[in-house]
Image: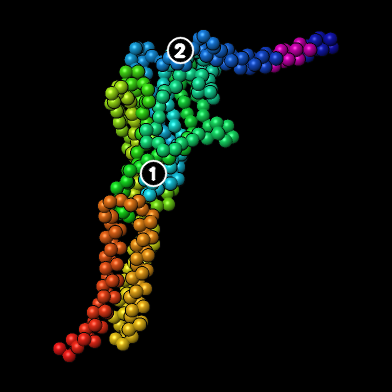
Amino acid sequence: MANRRCMTWMLFLFACICTASFASNAKINFREKEKKVLDQILGAGKYDARIRPSGINGTDGPAVVSVNIFVRSISKIDDVTMEYSVQLTFREQWIDERLKFDDIQGRLKYLTLTEANRVWMPDLFFSNEKEGHFHNIIMPNVYIRIFPNGSVLYSIRISLTLACPMNLKLYPLDRQVCSLRMASYGWTTDDLVFLWKEGDPVQVVKNLHLPRFTLEKFLTDYCNSKTNTGEYSCLKVDLLFKREFSYYLIQIYIPCCMLVIVSWVSFWLDQGAVPARVSLGVTTLLTMATQTSGINASLPPVSYTKAIDVWTGVCLTFVFGALLEFALVNYASRSGWKSL
């Protein structure tokens, strides 16, 4: 009886060991299966990254690439150079039927690559870009996911400095529209078409904060361009910024009002206090001129008149008028006009 029990326990332990070994081997084989799938679809002589994918449903039409972006931050909007800096996560997705593979009954959801040159990539570029760079800390912030149906998802984090032509006629009560334009560089619309992803093509981080602007809204649109070499697919998103007025109220408008009021103090001084009146008038005039030059130093030298120019010009006129009024009255009193 004891021998039977011992034999039973030994068989039970042996079964447990075999089961654990089988599970371990299955896991190892599963990872090996991923390697075999990658070698099968991207092996030498099996996939050519230079050839673009077929069109929808394997037709000879253009490859369709859906695009969506996530705006992580907007760090600077520069009025002088008329540019803005943005950091975003950029994503593209398309179908490449050459990359289809067996998902092992749903266990293999997707394959991940970190080398973009292993598969065909759309030749998208940012047409209004001035500067840009990738993020490589700690590792390059980029990945490619290949799904069993041949769908390819490309995601990368980038920082860009983009041109933003501005109209400053209403400055500082203005609104500015800054665009982000993306287009194909070499493939025409006969070979490659960019489309905004359906649903929510542009997302913006919730706690986006700008020191002097507020992002009111954004609009997505298409901007296909035609040249003598063909028509190229293009996407754009327009960001509408509203300038915050409180900063200019505290730094410009209130100080200008105070200078005008101070210049009027000379009207209540004794008519014989000529040095005091002259000093007060000249000081306020020079301060107002310095304030005006400081405002213009933070703006580009545009050829049209801005709203802030009208305001500072009126304030300067009032200050100069107060000084001129005293000079005329003093001259009249000394030339005998008072007796008349």
The image quadrant of residue 224 is top left
Question: Residue furthest toward the right?
Answer: 2
x and y percent of residue 90 in the render? 44, 32
Q: Which residues are magenta?
A: 10-20
Looking at the image, residue 175 lies above or below residue 153:
below
The residue to which callout 2 is attached is: 98
* SS of the residue under disc 1: strand
Inspect the magenta stretch and tell me whether residue 31 lies in it.
no
Q: Which mark is residue 173?
A: none
x and y percent of residue 104 in the render? 54, 13
- Please state which of residues 20 and 60 is positioned toward the viewer in this rendering: 60
Looking at the image, residue 238 lies above or below residue 91:
below
The residue to which callout 1 is attached is: 83
Label 2 to label 1: alpha-carbon separation: 42 Å
State which quarter of the image contains the N terminus. top right
Residue type, mark 1 in image: Glu
Label 1 environment density (alpha carbons within 10 Å; few <14, some 14–19, many ≥20): some
Residue type, mark 2 in image: Arg
State which quarter of the image contains the C terminus. bottom left
First reached walking from the N terminus: tag 2 or tag 1 = 1
**Can residue 59 be seen in this snapshot?**
yes
Between circles 2 and 1, the one closer to the viewer is: 1
Question: Residue furthest toward the front?
Answer: 335
